[in-house]
Image (cartoon, rainbow, N blue to C red):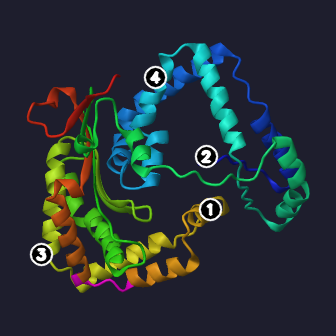
Amino acid sequence: GIMNSYDSIPKKTKEAMDVFSDYFTSVDFSDEKRIKVLLDEYFTSYKSSLNSQGSYYMQRRAKKTASHQGAFNEITHGISQFYSVLKFLKMDIHDIQKRLLKIHKTILSSGCVIFSIADSDSSKVFEENLSDFINKAELTPLLKKKEIDEDSFKSLTLLEGESYSDSSREIFTLNTQVGYLSSGYPVSPMCTKENAAEVILAKYLSGSLLWEKIRTKGGAYGASASTQGINDGFFCTTYRDPNPEKSLKIFSECFKIASKEKLSCEDLSRFVTGNYGEAHQPHSPYSDGWIGIWRFLSSITDEDRKLQNCLELDVSSEDIQKAAERLYKYSLQPERNSSAVIIDKSKKKKKNTGIIVDLPL
């Protein structure tokens, strides 16, 4: 879904609600010049970010078919969105206006859920003015979820001429001095011993093997591993990488090494403690509120979190070896992993495996 939010100081809660209600009802797409300027700015922003934040886009491509949320994130914030903006720029301005009006109408008619995260004083004012806010914003209850074929939805992430069979290996080319890579592998379900081991393995790889082989020896600015979402996958990513295609092979090599070498008690304790500290670091009230909303929407309960924490604290060196062995096997099975890479156009070769996309920059 689409999430809209506002922040305000407690004494301005009512005024903020009044302004926010106008956000829903005062939408105007009549200014053709303004729409064109916004589209141009949006496209320019995308072009510059592809060079500076390539790892962000490659990770979204690598996880695009891992889950419904992964597909949604790619469609709304990834390379897919870049091509959508490009398509809009080529459309007649009046067709764009009609499309935007239709989208706005569809969003409002679909209903909504309202979350309020505030202190006691602000919450009281919010509740007192909630009915007026709903009426002014013309909000309605959330409609029943539509049943959508998952494969059809995920197919929206495919680029022109692309199919599922070749979309798991994507090579994007542009004029750049450095590259970016992200590779995804299956991950075990949350709140299982296997998933807890994969979480700690990610910390181990990020702070040891990947850093040594890709950052120190390979010359990349950064390399990391992480588990994403609830069951989105296990991802290895490089940042400003002079040889990202070589790094893809190193990912597999690191899994193999981690499956053979047993961590010392000291190193295991360091990675487990570091993971726990990162998971429990203090956040601002604003951040805590957003994290709470995400967990609520993802159906992650406090009991789930406690169980996951306990499992992660209980991970053994043997558990990590088994997790690394699973991922090593996945890395050797093309159907069990996906990758997306940005390279310089001069490095494009016939022997490159996967679909090659020349980004229109």
Point out the tag, 2 or 4, that comes first from the N-terminus.
2
Q: Amino acid at mark 4?
A: Lys
Give the quarter of the image for residue 160: top left
Cβ atoms at labels 1 and 4 below 8 Å apart: no
- Which residue is at the front of the view, 9 or 85? 85
Q: Amino acid at mark 1?
A: Ile
Circle 4: element type: helix
Point out the tag, 1 or 3, that comes first from the N-terminus.
3
User: How many angstroms separate mark 4 from mark 3 (CA)?
Assistant: 49 Å
Residue 293: which numbered mark, if any? Answer: 1
Which residue position holds label 4? 87
Circle 3: element type: helix
Whether residue 147 can be seen here: yes
Which residue position holds label 2? 2
User: How many angstroms separate mark 1 from mark 4 (CA)?
Assistant: 33 Å
How would you rate the neighbour count of disc 4 (Cα within 10 Å): few for under 14, some for 14-19, many for 20 or more? few
Give the x, y percent position of residue 110.
Answer: 68, 45
How would you rate the neighbour count of disc 2 (Cα within 10 Å): few for under 14, some for 14-19, many for 20 or more? few
Magenta region: which residues? 313-318
Residue 183: which numbered mark, if any? Answer: none
Instruction: Name the residue located 45 percent from the left edge and 79 percent from the top edge.
Output: 308
